[in-house]
Amino acid sequence: MTRTIKTLILASVAALAMGVSAHAAGLTVGFSQIGSESGWRAAETAVTKQEAEKRGIDLKFADAQQKQENQIKAIRGFIAQGVDAIFVAPVVATGWEAVLTEAKEANIPVFLLDRGIDGPEDLYTTMVASDQVLEGKVAGDWLVKDQAGKECNVVELQGTTGSSPAINRKKGFEEAIAGTPTIKIIRSQTGDFTRAKGKEVMEGFLKAENGGKNICALYAHNDDMAVGAIQAIKEAGLKPGTDIKVVSIDSVPDIFQALAAGEANATVELTPNMAGPAFDALEKLKKDGTVPPKTIITESKLYTQADDPMKVYEEKKGLGY
Ligand code: AHR
């Protein structure tokens, strides 16, 4: 055996021992992240970086600070660098055709993470995301069951206007309550998925609705807005979780503390690990051309106060949220 062959074999054994597959190592992936608007988003960023490192993938990370124009610029940069794949969490659903066509023409596969786009499906290889309509439906079903026929005025904090989760989570919730005329959405406004905006908009809802006395429940498209709103409810002299029921989406650690304190009622879990399945799909694609399914759907699990929230909090708190 020549010295070169021996060296190559030793290098492969070392790579395998480190858990780095021969195909993953050496890949370069550009990731255009939306920003850091929520605890969930921070966890998604952390998990993506960890997954890349574990697999020996060189991850080029670009934070778009909630701006689509920054995402488009980053994607063009990745194309110019000739990366092996582009991951993008699209801040809004529309306006992607031109840049994704450029990626397609450069033969760079595009993976959508956690949000969808309005546009032809051939502009991307696969999308790893939750069923966002289902998330809204799970939240709405919980409220219908909880209210058991009682009159209930709901205020809704929507996510970023024009984003797929804001559109779909609204739709799913509305579908869930459609057969229950006693439950009505009386106010609905965007809180942009942030804690500060969630608080500010909730303060407005409380003022407009007799100090909150007309409000029975809050539906927030993410936990961060719910946590901000919980603060506003307390400052208005009401008890969140009791005077105003709180149901939201994400399952970040802070909402489990609120559930344990009786200040929130239910949350629908969204895994921050969108990158793991996307990297798996990319590795298979590069290895033998296996084309992944168009959508890879993650689970949407409901948690309530009955689910030992402090135990879940302990499990989640160190995971990058
Ligand atoms: O696209 C997923 C959503 O984006 C999360 O639910 C929210 O917290 C984030 O900002």
Image (cartoon, helix red, strand yellow):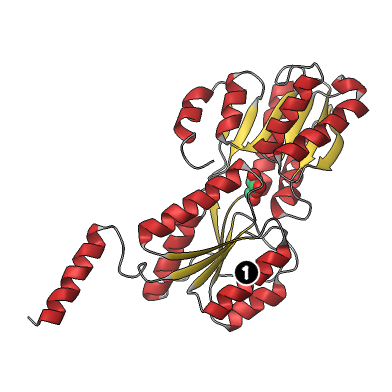
Identified at 72% across, 17% down, the residue is: 242
In the rendered image, residue 15, in percent from the top left (x then y), is placed at 25, 64
Task: Say if disc 1 is inside 8 Å of ligand 1.
Answer: no
Quadrant position of residue 71: bottom right
Frontmost residue, 89 versus 199 = 199
As displayed, is residue 95 above or below residue 114? below
Which residue in the structure is indicated by mark 1? 74
In the rendered image, residue 63, in percent from the top left (x then y), is placed at 61, 59
Quadrant position of residue 276: bottom left
As displayed, is residue 64 above or below residue 125? above
Q: Which image quarter holds the N terminus?
A: bottom left
Give the side of residue 184 with respect to residue 76, left or right. Answer: right
Mark 1, other Cα within 10 Å: few <14 / some 14–19 / many ≥20? many
As displayed, is residue 101 above or below residue 74? below
Quadrant position of residue 79: bottom right
As displayed, is residue 143 above or below residue 53? above
Give the side of residue 204 with respect to residue 12, left or right. Answer: right
Identified at 61% across, 37% down, the residue is: 268
In the rendered image, residue 246, in percent from the top left (x then y), is placed at 71, 27
Residue lying furthest left: 1
Give the side of residue 184 with respect to residue 262, left or right. Answer: right
In the rendered image, residue 310, in percent from the top left (x then y), is placed at 51, 23
Secondary structure at numbered mark 1: helix
* Count of marks placed on residues: 1
Give the residue type that dot 1 points to.
Ala
Identified at 48% across, 50% down, the residue is: 47
Residue 246 can be seen in this image = yes
Residue 121 can be seen in this image = no
Give the side of residue 113 with respect to residue 18, left or right. Answer: right
Q: Which image quarter holds the C terminus?
A: top right
Identified at 77% across, 40% down, the residue is: 197
